[in-house]
Amino acid sequence: MSEELTSEQIQLALQGISVPPQPQIMVDLQMEQYMPDPDLGAIARLIAQDPGLSGALLKIVNSAHYGLSSKIASIDKAVNLLGSRTVINLINAQSIRGEMTDEAIVTLNRFWDTAQDVAMTSLTLAKRIGSQTVDESYALGLFHDCGIPLMLKRFPDYMTVLEEAYANAGPDCRVVDTENRAFDTNHSVVGYYTAKSWRLPEHVTNAIANHHNALAIFQDDSSRDPTLKNLLAPLKMAEHICQSYRVLGSQDVDHEWESVGPLVL
């Protein structure tokens, strides 16, 4: 999805879904991140102004994923430990959550937890295989399904259709094909435009757009876009390990992995 579309084509693809504007705190954080020498103290001060984001950041840094010997209670320490890129990815993900109604948040409680699990697992796998896109793997893990809560906000029966999509997934039917038939759009498209609007790196937005097109991508033996394969490989493994097919699709079997897994491995 690298070609530029007109605003009319984008609106048609989004089917009435409003892509949330990037919160001002994210604009400020990214401006600081892009400085030649990012000031971690300034980043910490920006986050500390928002109690919700501060609490979410401390909860994540004190989670089992980081295995710290003692709990961190300081935003400054959390930012120094994680680094600016990881912090901004986390805050971006929390900002998507802030767009949801209370009802949608409850419906997707396990979704938020799984997104973090997939992100950390993608990061671990990317490090293990010596990937050059470790930070991007983490961002992709957090954001690849960011279109799901926005789809649910627009279509009340979305989760029912998503379960059907995972049940029918296979070589001849992608998860997004079932969504397209029901809504004329899908969470990969919505996620792509959201990530693009929020200025995520182009190769990450491209991977978001294609994360349910992995079978065709890995069947292509050409060397075209190796970065896309390098990002999608740990992501698809992480989705399988973290059982996204159960959390999102209520399935006992990962039908998508049965097709793409042998090619990824």
Image (spheres, helix red, strand yellow):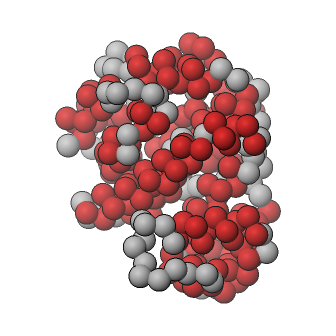
Q: Could you say which quadrant of the image residue 221 lies in?
A: top left
Q: Position of residue 42 (x, y in %)?
A: 70, 83
Count of marks, rendered view? 0
Q: Position of residue 159 (x, y in %)?
A: 59, 26
Q: Position of residue 178 (x, y in %)?
A: 50, 17
- Identify whether 236 is placed above or below 11: below
**Is 190 on the left or on the right of 137, as rendered?**
right
Is residue 88 something that shows in the picture?
Answer: no
- Identify whether 9 is placed above or below 224: above
User: Which residue is at the front of the view, 196 or 176?
Assistant: 176
**Is 209 on the left or on the right of 7, as rendered?**
left
Q: Position of residue 88 (x, y in %)?
A: 61, 66
Residue found 52% across the figure and 71% down from its top: 61
Residue found 26% across the figure and 28% down from its top: 258
The quadrant the C terminus occupies is top left
Residue found 69% across the figure and 71% down from its top: 54
Is residue 183 something that shows in the picture?
Answer: yes
- Identify whether 183 is placed above or below 239: above
User: Which residue is at the front of the view, 261 or 263?
Assistant: 261
User: Which residue is at the front of the view, 236 or 244?
Assistant: 244
Q: Could you say which quadrant of the image residue 243 lies in?
A: top left
Residue found 32% across the figure and 27% down from its top: 253
Which residue is most to the top? Answer: 181
